[in-house]
Image (cartoon, helix red, strand yellow):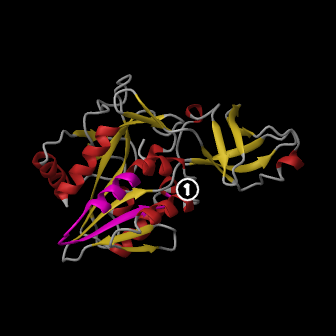
Amino acid sequence: MDKLLNNLVNAFGVSGSEGDVRNIIKEELKDIQCIVNEDKLGSLIVKLGEGQEKIMFCAHMDSIGFIVTFIEESGLIRVGKIGDFSSSDVINNLVRFKNGTLGKLTLNKEQLFIDIGVDRKDRVMQVVTEGDIASLVGSCHEMGEENIISPNLDNRIGCYILLRLAKGLKNIDKEVYFLFSTQHELGGRGARAAAHVISPEYCIVVDLEEAGDVFGEKNNIKLGKGPIIKVMDKTLIMHEDIKKMLEKSAEKSKLQVQYLVSNSKSDGGTIHKEGLGIKTGELSIPCRYKHCFSEIVNIKDIEDSIKLLKGLI
């Protein structure tokens, strides 16, 4: 397992609390010649190169999570969702609060609770209070044919790809921006604010997209068959120039790609409307069981995405 990827996946980074992920990224960027700025919403804006053309790559740092809304007299902790996901996909798994307190996520009559093994409200409140945030927690493992399984792969995989890409670039004749954004799960707030400041000509969002190769009910996307050119989702139609750039790079590098029209939402939906408009598209990595405890992605899809984006630059 790649140490950097393992560190990113295991970092606490629920929407609005991305500090640990941000610190890992900053540490990784210390050895390369770049300009790193942190904006008011906590997003990291990394600039490499000089030139007339501006291109931005974006990956969100945050993950889904849970916020404490009430503590029962029995010691059970009532929580609400941070992000859009199904309760049935996350119940009966471990969660961790920012202070390290562990608990089990459970469901009762459509209400989510966390059990930390303490049976009195006053004792629970010594370690957890209303407004505290918890994240899914679990080990990251390699499995099967070059696959990775872990919680929080969405979207630490995107952050990993951008870091690998930034560290591998040399002699750039344009301004290349790498945006590690905050609060994607809360409406893409970080990406929108940063895009307004950077105002690039082109933007490519790097994120995960649900694969349908298990039951085939959602789409024909498969793991290990290449990154996805997401033609359209609920909030964005990929700009034709971005589509051509991605296709040209894939053809030049002899990389297989997949195409998808999706019902999901992405940071691209807010980015493309900023300023006078930004030519925007998304390159997605196939993921089984997105937004649950055991997300699965393929290592080859990750490596091919890095090659494709590097060739584009």
Viewport quadrant of the N terminus: top left
Residue nearest the observer in this picture, 210 or 236:
210
Q: Residue 73, image x and y in percent? A: 87, 42
Residue nearest the observer in this picture, 199 or 149:
149
State the residue at coordinates (29%, 33%). 224
Tell me if 213 is positioned left or right of 49 in this view: right
Q: Is residue 283 above or below residue 288?
A: below
Q: Mark 1, residues whose alpha carbon is within 10 Å: few (<14), some, or many (≥20)?
A: many
Q: Residue 277, image x and y in percent? A: 28, 68
Viewport quadrant of the C terminus: bottom left
State the residue at coordinates (43%, 69%). 193
**Corner quadrant of residue 271:** bottom left
Per the rendered image, the range of residues in magenta is 159-183
The amino acid pointed to by label 1 is Ser
Q: Residue 27, image x and y in percent? A: 46, 64
Question: SS of the residue at dot 1?
Answer: loop
Q: Residue 284, image x and y in percent? A: 32, 46
Q: Is residue 230 visible?
A: no
